């Protein structure tokens, strides 16, 4: 665990703004006027399916790639044409990018050497980072002699010693197993809070995004689909796509009238599995599949030809093939128009 009581000076973060970024590759468009602002010291997650442009955004922010249009601002200053080393940004890659022939200590301070930081200062920062990340006993080892989690810590150590105001991370946990991922998730978050740096973190894992972020930026096919706090994204998904991307299992999406009256402009109604209850006298359904998970049970149900999943607490005495009835709070319904945009039911008077 990270030694949180260590008297390290918080670095403090800087505001990061990506303004109207556009990027085309020979194969097509990767980014289409992406605008994002991450407040100083905030933890923002870029979330989205494979190929939606997350890594491209991050590489442009780092200065490893030039945008075709748009600007990158750090602390209000336009850095679009500055090289990576002049931006005051640390980056942690999925592959860790460690040098196999260098020791842990040399790997951690490599960037500082390259920047000409004096030896005494390098030693001081290395000692602080090593204590913070539990690397003290591993400093003489080579990366090949470390576990995946330890290698991950070395990569984090580089970001710590850089004392950058902005840290960019690209799927840093994807090479770790589930348990270690959960532990490292906590450690990265504690580290970011402790140092106060601004974080832009890429993942395609919505659980990771929800668990870590102050702000989730959901990207889809090169544009920002929704930019909101995790609770807002969960409670008020702005689009059908956002609704289907967040939540396990994801939100049920059915033809608009499947669960009762719907606004006239609605094409789709959504309800989260956890909002569906087994209830006497409710809508009749047939149980198709029962998946007992310990704390909950996922029931796959068919409702007049449509299929939906209910996530109910504990274990239920129902088998596949059984008839049941379900209920829900009408306030738990989400409606989307034919373009996939959320309808705000408070303002939709015309219920069918
Ligand atoms: P993943 O989660 O799979 O890493 P991503 O959301 O990070 O995906 P990007 O790596 O940013 O997506 O890629 C966005 C699009 O741009 C993809 O269609 C990809 O094939 C394309 N692309 C990325 N880098 C290049 C490149 N150097 N040359 C050509 N096309 C590229």
Image (spheres, helix red, strand yellow):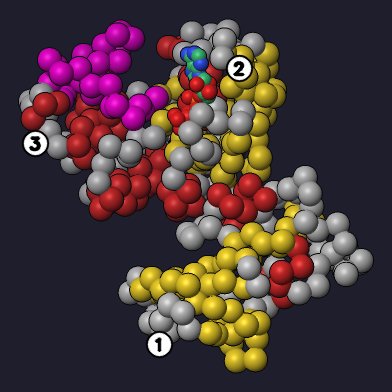
Q: Does the residue tagged 2 have its C-beta within 8 Å of any atom of ligand 1? A: yes
Please tell me which residue lies in front, 316 or 321: 321
| CA distance separating discs 2 and 3 | 48 Å
Q: Name the secondary structure under disc 3.
A: helix
Q: Identify the residue shown where x is 60% and y is 92%.
A: 280
Residue 203: name its quadrant.
top left
Q: Do the residues labelled 1 and 2 touch (CB within 8 Å)?
A: no
Numbered circle sitting on residue 28: 2
Q: Reply above or below: 49 against 155.
A: below
* Residue 58 screen position, x and y as percent: 50, 25
* Residue 210 screen position, x and y as percent: 49, 52
Q: Reply above or below: 43 against 243.
A: above
In the picture of the structure, the residue carrying the numbered disc 3 is: 137
Q: Identify the residue shown where x is 65% and y is 35%.
A: 224
Q: Which of the two discs, 2 and 3, labels the residue nearer the N terminus?
A: 2
* Residue 119 screen position, x and y as percent: 21, 14
User: Does the segment drawn in magenta span residue 301?
Assistant: no
**Magenta stretch, residue numbers:** 91-119
Q: Identify the residue shown where x is 25% and y is 53%.
A: 179
User: Does the segment drawn in magenta span residue 118?
Assistant: yes
* Residue 139 screen position, x and y as percent: 11, 28
Q: How crowded is mark 3: few (under 14 residues within 10 Å), some or many (20 or more)?
A: few
In the picture of the structure, the residue carrying the numbered disc 1 is: 317
The C terminus lies in quadrant: bottom right
């Amino acid at each position: 665990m990270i030694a949180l009581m260590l008297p390290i000076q918080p670095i403090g973060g800087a505001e990061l703004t990506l303004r109207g970024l556009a990027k085309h590759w020979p194969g097509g468009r990767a980014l289409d006027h992406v605008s994002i602002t991450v407040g100083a010291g905030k933890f923002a997650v870029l979330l989205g399916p494979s190929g939606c442009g997350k890594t491209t955004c991050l590489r442009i922010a780092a200065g490893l790639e030039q945008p075709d249009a748009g600007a990158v601002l750090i602390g209000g200053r336009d850095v679009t044409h500055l090289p990576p080393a002049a931006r005051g940004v640390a980056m942690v890659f999925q592959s860790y990018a460690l040098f196999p022939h260098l020791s842990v200590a040399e790997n951690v301070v490599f960037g500082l050497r390259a920047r000409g930081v004096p030896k005494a200062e390098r030693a001081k920062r290395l000692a602080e980072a090593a204590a913070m990340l539990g690397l003290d006993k591993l400093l003489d080892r080579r990366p090949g002699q470390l576990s995946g989690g330890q290698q991950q810590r070395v990569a984090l150590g580089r970001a710590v010693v850089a004392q950058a105001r902005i840290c960019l991370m690209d799927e840093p946990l994807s090479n770790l197993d589930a348990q270690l991922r959960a532990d490292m998730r906590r450690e990265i978050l504690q580290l970011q809070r402790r140092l106060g740096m601004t974080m832009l973190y890429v993942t395609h894992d919505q659980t990771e995004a929800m668990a870590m972020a102050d702000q989730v930026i959901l990207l889809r096919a090169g544009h920002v689909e929704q930019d909101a706090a995790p609770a807002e994204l969960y409670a008020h998904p702005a689009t059908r796509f956002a609704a289907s991307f967040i939540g396990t299992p994801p939100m049920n999406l059915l033809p608009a009238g499947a669960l009762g009256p719907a606004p006239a402009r609605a094409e789709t109604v959504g309800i989260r599995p956890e909002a569906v209850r087994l209830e006497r006298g409710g809508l009749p359904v047939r149980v198709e599949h029962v998946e007992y998970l310990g704390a909950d049970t996922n029931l796959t149900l068919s409702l007049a030809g449509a299929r939906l999943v209910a996530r109910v607490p504990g274990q239920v005495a129902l088998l596949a093939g059984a008839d049941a009835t379900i209920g829900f709070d009408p306030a738990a319904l989400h409606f989307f128009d034919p373009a996939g945009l959320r309808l705000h039911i408070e303002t939709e008077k015309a219920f069918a």
